[in-house]
Amino acid sequence: MNEPAERLRRMLARVKARGQRLLVLGVGNDMLGDDAIGVLVARDLEALNSETFLAVPVGIGVENAGHLIRRHRADVVLIFDAVAAPSRKPWLFVPPSRLDTFCHSTHSVPLSLLIRAWQQDSPAVRVHFVGIRPRLVALGAPLSPALQAVRAEIVGMFNEFSANQR
């Protein structure tokens, strides 16, 4: 059983059952190989954008995404980004309280601080972080085959979710 995949499926089912608005933020640098994974997932998901679902590839500017939460009136925010996780899993959910452990070197503002600010501005919003373990982060490198598979798996779950929304 793929624990993160099951957790994401359950989360998407809850969002649907509750009629919630979902915002996906894709973080990363698309010039650095696997670091682009969050951006690429969000780009793939943009085709599904609707009144209740919005995917935005924010790139390296996640600090500027707070207005998207307000504008979309998001109930749930999912952030996808590459992380140097000690886990053997190719991707995992990281509790916001532990984000600084995983994501301390590539963001000018710690993600945990951003999430707290977003939650002060929109107290009801639930923010979840999905970290994807990069294999190769190098200037000009393509996305590795391992992360291409993770990308396809995640996008496939959202496609199922979207098909079930109709």
Image (tube, rainbow, N blue to C red):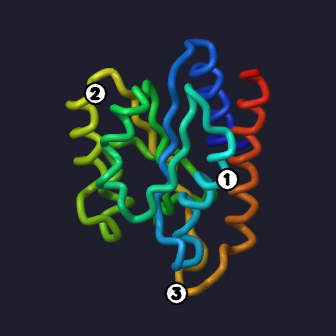
Q: Residue at x 30, y 56 (%)?
A: 100
Q: Is residue 119 above or below residue 131?
A: above
Identify the element where label 3 is drawn.
loop
**Residue marked by disc 1:** 44
Q: Residues within 10 Å of mark 1 (few under 14, many from 20)?
A: some
Q: Position of residue 126 (x, y in %)?
A: 40, 29
**Amino acid at circle 1:** Asp
Q: Is residue 65 above or below residue 139?
A: above
| Residue furthest top in the image | 18
**Amino acid at circle 2:** Ser
Identify the element where label 2 is drawn.
loop
Identify the element where label 1 is drawn.
helix
Q: CA distance from mark 1 to mark 2?
A: 27 Å
**Residue marked by disc 2:** 122
Q: Residue at x 45, y 36 (%)?
A: 77
Q: Position of residue 13 (x, y in %)?
A: 65, 22
Q: CA distance from mark 3 to mark 2?
A: 36 Å
Asked if labels 1 and 3 touch by Cβ distance under 8 angstroms, the answer is: no
Q: Is residue 39 above or below residue 19?
A: below
**Residue marked by disc 3:** 139
